[in-house]
Image (spheres, helix red, strand yellow):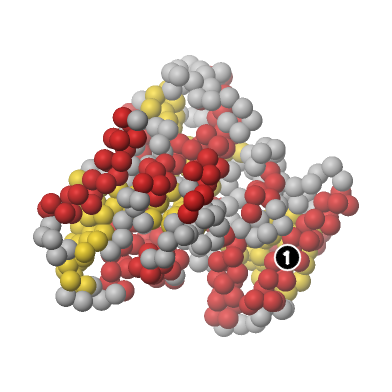
Amino acid sequence: MLAALVCGQLLSAPLRAQQTEENTDTQTLLRLTGSNTIGAELAPMLVKGYLRSLDATEITQRSQGERHWISARLSGQRVEVPIVALGSSTGFNALDHGSADIGMASRRIKATEIQRLSRFGNMAGADAEHVIGLDALVIAVHPSNPVGQLTIDQLGQIYRGEIRNWRELGGPNLPIRPLQRDTQSGTRATFDREVFASGGAPAATVRVVSGNAETHSLVQKWRGAIGYLPFAEASGISKIAIKAGNLAAVVPDRGIIATEDFPLTRRLYLYRNPGSFNPRVDDFLRYAESPAGQEIVASAGFINLTPVTLKMPPYPNAPAAYRQLMESGERLSISFRFADGSTELDNRALEDLHRLQHYMEASERPLNLTLVGFSDHKNNRNIADQISRFRALKVQGALLRDHQLGNSRILALGAFAPLTGNREHAPVKNSRVEVWIN
């Protein structure tokens, strides 16, 4: 009970600060609470961009630790947007308590949170959940560490305390000093979900850091350190290539993150109460998803959702039709995925249908579109082929029905090229539809 009271006091602090430090004529436009990854820089930048789009003037920011207040003059009225960036979980707590209009999260809402907030409506539905960008966790080590590659399983062994010395991984005779974020962090939740999906948990001896800045500092300072950082905050550090599934080990770059093929990729979310109509909240969410908002996402160091072309090297063992496509075509950064591995497109995919339509319409030359379907069903090749074809047809049908894009062909590859072997994540990650153009 005491913890809940303290949490409620923390979440309402920006509003109280606004009431006491500003004059009573200041209007609060909307309130954001949650992820530090989003709230530290991206959210203030989006709010300022949004205010500029409304022709607001005198836009200023004041900050106190992880709390920020964006002030401006809009149509002659002083307005303010408070932002509290204390971790993804606090965003859902704030929505629950009514002390925020938008919850920021660097991980997807949990089943327990969906249930707790079910009185508002479907928190996992398109009315509540908005994907505004992508990020990836970069595995960082000291610059002198010669170990350049790890598997997801090895990461789990390190953090469970089963591998304790770098020499066990081909490195120096040096104790490993793993670092992790606190349990309120969406960055921590993403790491735990990917690395411990097969079981286990971090050892009690793993050091908990206060934030990404401390991780960045310690991996530069301690020779035995290993930690994880958001892609946007991983400049100037020594990065480890990560291997999962049948893919080669990779250090994340913008292209591999944009396709969501990198194993530690995560989405950046904004959540609203679907049962409450607030035109200002809806307007801000539309701005964040718009081309102007997506430019800000990219300028903040994250990967935006605007489609770009990628030249992918052909897989040596690729089926002939796919290899020919990889040699002659270009892959778009859009990959359509399905809600919890079901037959329905997920919330990002629904927006990506619009983005693909705009991309095709803006092209200066005619484009041939190929939708490449993949399945997670490995036990029966015929069934896997049928499922992968069905998924590609699902996307093709939506493009034709709702977006008047009928010029596309289908390539079904069954269970070829799985992105993960983890049973929990495989239905969502491996079941996908790639988009190729030539």
Circle 1: is it few (<14), some (14-19), or many (20+) Cα within 10 Å?
Answer: some
Residue 50, compared with residue 367, is above or below; it is above
Quadrant for residue 298, please give it. bottom left
The secondary element bearing badge 1 is classed as: helix
Residue 116 percent across, percent down from the top left = 49, 43
Left or right: residue 363 versus residue 207 is: right
Residue 187, compared with residue 169, is above or below; it is below
- Amino acid type indicated by mark 1: Lys
Tell me which residue sits at (65%, 60%) in the image. Answer: 345
Image quadrant for the N terminus?
top left
Residue 108 percent across, percent down from the top left = 51, 47
Q: Nearer the viewer, residue 229 or 64?
A: 64
Left or right: residue 205 versus residue 391 is: left
Tell me which residue sits at (38%, 27%) in the image. Answer: 208
**Residue 277 visible in the picture:** yes
Residue 403 percent across, percent down from the top left = 63, 77
Residue 50 percent across, percent down from the top left = 32, 68
Residue 143, compared with residue 54, is above or below; it is above
Tell me which residue sits at (55%, 76%) in the image. Answer: 358
Q: Nearer the viewer, residue 437 or 36?
A: 36
Quadrant for residue 184, please give it. top left
Image quadrant for the C terminus?
bottom right
The residue tagged 1 is 394
**Residue found at the far front of this picture:** 119
